[in-house]
Image (cartoon, rainbow, N blue to C red):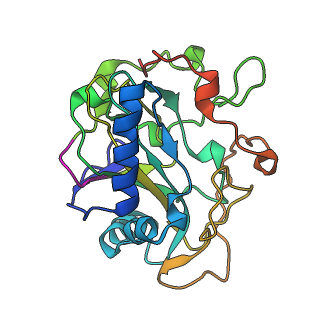
Amino acid sequence: MCRSAGLCGCAQRWPSCSTAAAARARATASTCSRKAIRRAIRGCIACPARRTSIRPSGISFAADVVGPDVKFHHAKLNVKSGQGSRGFSWHQDIPAWPHTDFSPVTVGIYIDGCTPEQGPLTVAEGSHEGPLFSMYDDAGNYVVKIRDSDLGWLNEDSTRRLTGGPGTTLLLNCRAVHGSAPNKASAARPLLLPVYSSADSFPITPSPIPSPHQGDIVRGRPARFASFDTRPVEMPPDWRGGYKPVWMHKNKDETPY
């Protein structure tokens, strides 16, 4: 498994999930009508999706990097419909849902696989060991995008496009700089993204993607003491006022580089 890029790359075939299948069908229909479905943010409420999110193999991957006691935070399904569905600019995850430490890890599962033409998740190697960047633009909007002026160090040679067949699973460090290009293929690219942390890591703010299962211990035991990392992290907006989708601030043709 590769840890140099702030992730561990694993291959595992996951069984089909009815919620994912429904999203795939809707994405296909939406592509035909030119109305692309981008994200399903509360799939973990549905039992089939939640079973997929907490399968033992996925939790085992998370436990490899966060420790034996594992806590669930949230999950979403990024569909990325075909025929030009927009990309996602360079960003980091943890500023959107800061915790008392930096143990949170995203377990990304390519349900149908992902080719280079489908806008694969792309990570800046080693960026998890670097600084956290602001996710606000100059006007004070929370855009989940690193300013271009902060990306002078980044080039295509320092990034890795993560592709693979159906069931390919990726572990993404919460500090890693990552993004994706538009999906230029005809097929959608559903990517299931449950997020876990160590049991002694606690959210500092409300989640932008609330889940009734947030805080569930999915392996091991609850923590009696909290873990604290003293490195600073920028605070997001107060998500109790609602979550404004970040693509409302983005152009259709944005690419990570």
Residue 27: which quarter of the image? Answer: top left
Q: As displayed, is residue 81 above or below residue 60?
A: above
Q: Nearer the viewer, residue 214 or 148?
A: 214
* Quadrant placement of the C terminus: top left
**Magenta highlight range:** 164-169
Residue 114 in sight = yes
Q: Is 54 placed left or right of 91 in the picture?
A: left
Q: Nearer the viewer, residue 234 or 183?
A: 183
Q: Nearer the viewer, residue 227 or 253?
A: 253
Residue 144 in sight = no
Q: Residue at x 38, y 33 (%)?
A: 81
Q: Is 99 placed left or right of 167 in the picture?
A: right
Residue 70: image x %, image y %? 49, 73
Q: As displayed, is residue 141 above or below residue 7?
A: above
Q: Is 25 placed left or right of 106 in the picture?
A: left
Q: Residue at x 32, y 37 (%)?
A: 188
Q: Is 92 placed left or right of 19 in the picture?
A: right
Q: Residue at x 24, y 26 (%)?
A: 117
Q: Nearer the viewer, residue 72 or 47?
A: 47
Residue 243: image x %, image y %? 70, 43
Q: Is residue 167 magenta?
A: yes
* Quadrant placement of the N terminus: bottom left
